[in-house]
């Protein structure tokens, strides 16, 4: 676990950058706030656990607010598909939702777009040459969709790969930001994603401070892009520390 019994669940909120943001609804008598009461630059608490699936080579469970994800890793194992000998291994990724994950999206089905994006996020960090002509299968299951699903899936998958002993250059962390009006909200929930003007997701290797993937949709100004990148880099670094602590605690528990 990333948090000891009785201790507060850690969070990975970035440092505030620049001045405070303008309110979303100008000339309004309403005081706008986030659905869960967080500040615009405040992330949800991150609960992480390895070894969630005993039958897998490695696994991890992640709970970020109402977003709950479990990832299982199988392999390296001999590929079932006939293929010419290769010096590098093969990576298969699948992201699916349970039937009760969300009332609106991905009801009990595979999410091909997320599966492809998970593959792209992981393939650059795994040392594929360490398991030639074999396959590593990564299965991510979203138990509850509460917002920022893909970023939670990617971070959880990285933790599961480490638990499986797959050689990697570094852990992969992912953080999302939503742009609503003139305001940036890190780690958005479902309600915020539904009314966002633009979305931004970054995956990076925190120890190397290297960005591995950027996904940007919607309308963004240059200052907002720069601020979103700084927010995500700082949050990814702090999330990486939480993930490493989780792995250390798991290793210590196995030695006892």
Image (cartoon, rainbow, N blue to C red):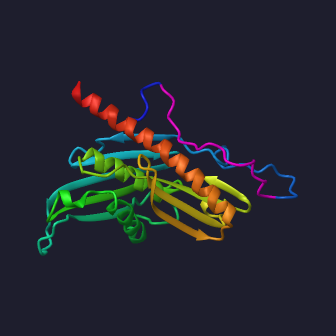
Q: Is residue 195 left or right of residue 82?
A: right
| Residue placed most toward the observer, 150 or 67 | 150
Q: Is residue 52 left or right of residue 45?
A: left
* Percent coordinates x, y for residue 138 in the rendering: 29, 58
* Percent coordinates x, y for residue 186 in the rendering: 60, 52
| Viewer can see residue 228 | yes
Name which residue lies at 23% across and 24% down: 256
Task: Point out the stretch of residues depicted in magenta.
Answer: 7-25
Name which residue lies at 40% across and 52% down: 172
* Percent coordinates x, y for residue 187 in the rendering: 57, 52
Tell whether position 18 is magenta.
yes
| Residue placed most toward the observer, 58 or 204 | 204
Name which residue lies at 33% across and 38% down: 247
Q: Is residue 3 left or right of residue 86?
A: right
- Specify the quadrant of the image occupied by residue 135: bottom left
| Residue placed most toward the observer, 141 or 108 | 141
- Specify the quadrant of the image occupied by residue 13: top right
| Residue placed most toward the observer, 232 or 46 | 232
């Amino acid at each position: 676990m990333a948090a000891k019994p009785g201790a507060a669940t850690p969070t990975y909120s970035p440092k505030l950058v620049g001045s405070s943001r303008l309110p979303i609804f100008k000339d309004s008598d309403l005081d706008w706030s986030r659905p869960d009461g967080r500040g615009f630059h405040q992330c949800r608490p991150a609960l992480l656990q390895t070894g969630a699936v005993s039958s897998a080579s490695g696994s991890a469970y992640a709970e970020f607010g109402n977003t709950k994800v479990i990832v299982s890793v199988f392999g390296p194992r001999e590929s079932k598909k006939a293929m010419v000998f290769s010096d590098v291994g093969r990576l298969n990724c699948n992201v699916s939702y349970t039937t009760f994950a969300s009332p609106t999206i991905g009801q009990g089905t595979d999410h091909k777009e997320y599966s492809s994006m998970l593959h792209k996020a992981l393939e650059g960090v795994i040392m594929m040459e360490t398991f030639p002509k074999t396959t590593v299968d990564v299965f991510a299951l979203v138990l509850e969709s509460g917002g920022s699903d893909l970023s939670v899936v990617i971070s959880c998958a990285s933790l599961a790969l480490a638990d499986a002993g797959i050689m990697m250059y570094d852990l992969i962390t992912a953080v999302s930001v939503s742009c609503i009006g003139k305001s940036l909200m890190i780690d958005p929930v479902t309600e915020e994603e539904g009314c966002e003007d633009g979305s931004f997701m970054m995956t990076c290797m925190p120890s190397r401070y290297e960005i591995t993937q950027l996904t940007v949709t919607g309308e963004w100004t240059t200052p907002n892009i720069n601020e979103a990148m700084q927010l995500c880099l700082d949050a990814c670094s702090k999330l990486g520390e939480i993930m490493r602590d989780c792995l250390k605690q798991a290793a210590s528990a196995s030695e006892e």
